[in-house]
Image (tube, rainbow, N blue to C red):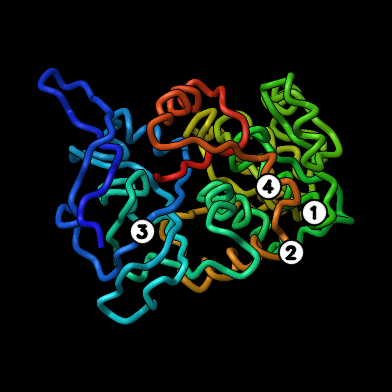
């Protein structure tokens, strides 16, 4: 087995700035863990871009390799949890935050972090989904478990052109829901209709009237990635007994809201955490993504870049200019 490999390394300079470059590393440099994985694909998430630019809310210790997603084959498992050659998916936990992540040809992690690649998905497809797809599926599953059914009315997806939003639109449409996609990018209507959206609204239209204590009932359920005023307005416009899931803060981490949606309409607000999600639920969700919820246009949702071409995509996602998903192919 090769002992040297390529990785994207983020380093802090003497003037407290951060530089990114492809460097050669040794397997001996990797952190402790039972599982050594040869990474074939990773993906780009907003959290990866923050880590790559030195954001202290994600990563504090440098040098560091970002990448909160990874898919590849097991090289060795000291605890016998996986056979060599087994295909696995790794998302969440500390990967790519303080533990060197998927922007490298090898990772070493605790074996509990890995999920077997389910039948019906390729390694590349799993990273076209990645944490974004996993989070979208967790959100949809929460709506289903809350009793939100297709015949009850429209389901709103905010931030619909992003990674989580675009996959949520696709999953919900495939599951038979009438999906209303909200976006600040009015030029992306055809993209969203192509994913299965029945209606596309400008973000401002969703928020309009949000200053009122309650808004006219419209949504049977909501998948929100925006937070802030968008989430508040969505809650105020959700129908009696509806469910709103919250998984992001693209607009704001703040939520200014009264209790009326909860005590007058019985609306529930469900937080979605993909980082510490328990292993049994992880396997259930990945199974659905490989089967009944697999987006039919997964290739159209993603583009592929090599590790040395990632810089442009990092800048794009930080600027809010990215559509869909970016798959990172390791050499």
Q: Nearer the viewer, residue 244 or 190?
A: 190
Q: Nearer the viewer, mark 1 or mark 3?
A: 3
Q: Secondary structure at mark 4?
A: loop
In the image, which disc is placed on residue 25? none
Q: Nearer the viewer, mark 1 or mark 4?
A: 4
Question: In the image, is residue 187 above or below residue 302?
Answer: above
Q: Nearer the viewer, residue 178 or 263?
A: 178
CA–CA distance between discs 1 and 3?
33 Å
Q: Secondary structure at mark 1?
A: helix
Q: Secondary structure at mark 3?
A: strand
- Residue 187, given in percent of the width and then of the height, sits at 74, 19
Q: Secondary structure at mark 2?
A: loop
Label 1: how many residues lie within 10 Å, few (<14), some (14-19) or many (20+)? some
| Residue carrying label 3 | 38
CA–CA distance between discs 4 and 2?
13 Å
Q: Nearer the viewer, mark 2 or mark 3?
A: 3
Q: Are discs 1 and 2 less than 8 Å apart at CB? A: yes
Image point 47% across, 39% down: which residue? 45
Residue located farthest toward the left when viewing the structure as drawn: 14
Quarter of the image for the C terminus: give it: top left
Q: Nearer the viewer, mark 4 or mark 2?
A: 4
Residue located farthest toward the bottom when viewing the structure as drawn: 80
| Residue carrying label 1 | 174
Q: From this viewpoint, is residue 25 visible?
A: yes
- Residue 215, given in percent of the width and then of the height, sits at 77, 33
CA–CA distance between discs 1 and 4?
12 Å
Label 2: how many residues lie within 10 Å, few (<14), some (14-19) or many (20+)? few
- Whether residue 192 sits left or right of residue 70 in the image: it is right
| Residue carrying label 2 | 292
- Residue 277, given in percent of the width and then of the height, sits at 46, 62
- Residue 288, given in percent of the width and then of the height, sits at 66, 65
């Amino acid at each position: 087995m090769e002992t040297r490999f390529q990785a994207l390394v983020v380093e802090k300079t003497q003037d407290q700035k951060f530089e990114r470059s492809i460097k050669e590393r040794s397997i001996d440099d990797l952190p402790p863990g039972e599982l050594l994985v040869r990474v074939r694909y990773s993906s780009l998430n907003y959290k990866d871009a923050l880590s790559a630019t030195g954001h202290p809310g994600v990563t504090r210790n440098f040098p560091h390799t970002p990448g909160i997603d990874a898919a590849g084959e097991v090289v060795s498992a000291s605890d016998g949890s996986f056979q060599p050659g087994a295909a696995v998916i790794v998302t969440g936990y500390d990967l790519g935050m303080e533990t060197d992540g998927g922007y490298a040809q090898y990772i070493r992690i605790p074996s509990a972090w890995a999920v077997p690649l389910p039948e019906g998905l390729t390694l590349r497809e799993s990273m076209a989904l990645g944490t974004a797809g996993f989070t979208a599926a967790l959100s949809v599953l929460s709506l289903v478990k809350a009793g939100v059914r297709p015949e009850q009315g429209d389901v709103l997806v905010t931030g619909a052109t992003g990674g989580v939003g675009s996959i949520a639109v696709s999953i919900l449409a495939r599951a038979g829901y009438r999906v209303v996609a909200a976006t600040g990018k009015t030029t992306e209507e055809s993209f969203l209709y192509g994913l299965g959206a029945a209606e596309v609204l400008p973000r401002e239209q969703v928020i309009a009237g949000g200053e009122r204590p309650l808004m006219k009932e419209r949504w049977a359920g909501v998948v929100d990635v925006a937070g802030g005023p968008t989430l508040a307005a969505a809650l105020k416009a959700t129908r009696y007994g509806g469910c709103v899931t919250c998984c992001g803060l693209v607009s704001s981490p703040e939520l200014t809201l009264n209790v009326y949606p909860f005590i007058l309409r019985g609306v529930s607000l469900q937080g979605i955490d993909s980082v510490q999600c328990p292993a049994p639920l992880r396997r259930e969700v990945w199974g659905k993504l490989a089967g009944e919820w697999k987006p039919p246009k997964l290739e159209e949702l993603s583009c592929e870049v090599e590790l040395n071409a990632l810089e442009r995509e990092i800048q794009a996602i930080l600027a809010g200019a990215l559509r869909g998903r970016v798959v990172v192919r390791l050499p």
